[in-house]
Image: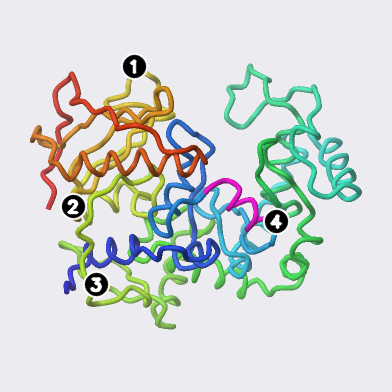
């Protein structure tokens, strides 16, 4: 048993319950960050698979269709249990108040999309696309490459007017929030402001489990620093969180994090958006490990590779893997933090990762993993603790 805070967080976060219902895994994690990149497998499916066993797109599609889970924006685009949907009400209200339709010039497209989905629930995004182009929020001022309907769908989703009700080969499918989750739709109009804020705060604290407000700032919504401090004080007064010492400063710890746990001593590859990796500052403070996902980093600035994944060896951060799917097999280049040899357990974890990637993709088992050491020098970094 251990009572060390980093070990407690890792053990609780990576607790495996094989065969657990998808919604139950999402609920105990609080949220699962999503991303569509599929170099190896979608990050959210990998995160879930490490906790409950292989999880596929059809599994997620079924949970969305049943209304058990929903996609919402907390600190990023995340999967939440529908029972935690009240945590999104404040964010939906904030988005509506910004009037994104006017800002991006897509008022007509938003009206047209809503009208079609009202008549035809479950339409796929590609069935709603138009050819008119507007400036996306990711583009410089002189570019207009985003389809107006793409922006309209994103705004309607972020405002809580539409929900993703499925993810299939044709992409995301949408329906009205009022039709799929009428109780949540009613909350947008009628939930008192304080109740909405408290629901968001409780959910953020439970999802992060160990945090400093600066690490999880995006999850706590907008507001002046003094207001944020007041709400953090409220979380402590209600017993949702308490302070514990980490180094020379305190961190806030959620009440559901056990004090004494069996430490996680396994070896595995973590998804690039795993819950343990949400904040680089938290990762470095708790585990002495530096990590940056390089998939959105220009090629010439990458140090590891486009889908670099942190590697845990015997319950400690060992280094990173640079995996790629080659002819249906996972090829991995290993990057130890301190230039050490690659342990047999790490190579075995790579073989298990290859099996898991194929299971997530719904493909049959293939031959052995191909593995190599990096040609360049090992990435510098602190030794795992």
Judged by its main secondary structure, the magenta piece is helix
**Front one among 191 and 178:** 178
- Report the residue marked by disc 3: 244
State how far apart marks 3 and 1 are (Cα).
Answer: 41 Å
The picture places residue 39, in percent across and down from the top left corner, at: 45, 30
**Mark 2 or mark 3: whose residue is earlier in sequence:** 3
Please indicate, yes or no, whether residue 211 appears anywhere in the rendered image.
Answer: no
Mark 1 vs mark 4: give the one in front: 4
Label 3, residues with CA under 10 Å away: few <14, some 14-19, many ≥20: few
**Mark 1 or mark 4: whose residue is earlier in sequence:** 4
- Report the residue marked by disc 4: 65
Mark 1 vs mark 2: give the one in front: 2
Whether 72 is drawn above or below 362: the answer is below
Residue 60 lies in magenta, yes or no?
yes
State how far apart marks 1 and 4 are (Cα).
Answer: 41 Å
| Quarter-of-image position of residue 328 | top left
- Report the residue marked by disc 2: 316
> Are circles 4 and 2 on residues that touch, CB within 8 Å?
no
Mark 3 vs mark 4: give the one in front: 4
> Are circles 1 and 2 on residues that touch, CB within 8 Å?
no
State how far apart marks 4 and 2 are (Cα).
Answer: 38 Å
State how far apart marks 3 and 4 are (Cα).
Answer: 41 Å
Please state if 231 lies on the left or on the right of 372 as rendered: right
Which residue occupies 54% across, 55% down? 74
Q: Which residues are magenta?
A: 56-64
Label 2, residues with CA under 10 Å away: few <14, some 14-19, many ≥20: many
**Mark 4 or mark 2: whose residue is earlier in sequence:** 4
- Report the residue marked by disc 1: 300
């Amino acid at each position: 048993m251990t009572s060390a805070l980093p070990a407690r967080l890792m053990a609780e976060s990576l607790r495996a319950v094989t065969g657990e219902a998808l919604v139950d895994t999402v609920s105990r994690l609080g949220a699962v960050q999503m991303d569509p990149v599929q170099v190896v497998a979608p990050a959210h499916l990998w995160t879930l698979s490490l906790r409950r066993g292989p999880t596929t797109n059809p599994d997620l599609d079924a949970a969305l269709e049943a209304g058990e889970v929903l996609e919402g924006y907390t600190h990023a685009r995340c999967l939440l249990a529908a029972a935690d949907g009240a945590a999104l009400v404040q964010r939906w209200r904030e988005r509506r108040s910004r009037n994104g339709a006017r800002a991006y010039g897509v008022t007509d497209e938003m009206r047209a999309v809503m009208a079609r989905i009202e008549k035809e629930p479950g339409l796929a995004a590609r069935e709603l696309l138009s050819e008119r182009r507007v400036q996306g929020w990711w583009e410089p001022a002189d570019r207009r490459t985003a389809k107006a309907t793409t922006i309209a769908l994103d705004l309607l989703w972020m405002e809580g007017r539409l929900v993703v009700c499925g993810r299939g080969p044709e992409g995301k499918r949408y329906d009205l929030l009022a039709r799929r989750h009428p109780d949540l739709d009613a909350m947008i109009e009628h939930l008192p402001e304080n109740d909405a804020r408290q629901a968001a705060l409780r959910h953020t604290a439970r999802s992060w489990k160990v945090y400093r407000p600066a690490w999880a700032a995006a999850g706590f919504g907008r507001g002046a620093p003094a207001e944020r401090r007041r709400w953090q004080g409220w979380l402590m007064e209600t017993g949702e969180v308490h302070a514990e010492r980490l180094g020379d400063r305190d961190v806030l710890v959620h009440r559901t994090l056990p004090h004494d746990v069996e430490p996680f001593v396994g070896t595995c590859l973590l998804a690039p958006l795993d819950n343990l990796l949400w904040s680089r500052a938290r990762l470095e403070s708790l585990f002495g490990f530096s990590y940056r996902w390089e998939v959105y980093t220009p090629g010439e600035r990458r140090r590891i590779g486009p889908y670099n994944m942190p590697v845990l060896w015997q319950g400690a951060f060992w280094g990173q893997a640079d995996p790629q799917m080659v002819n249906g097999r996972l090829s991995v280049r290993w990057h130890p933090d301190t230039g050490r040899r690659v342990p047999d357990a790490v190579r075995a974890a790579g073989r298990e990762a290859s099996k898991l990637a194929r299971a997530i993709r719904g493909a049959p088992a293939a031959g052995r993993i191909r593995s190599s050491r990096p040609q360049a020098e090992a990435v510098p970094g602190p030794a795992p603790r």
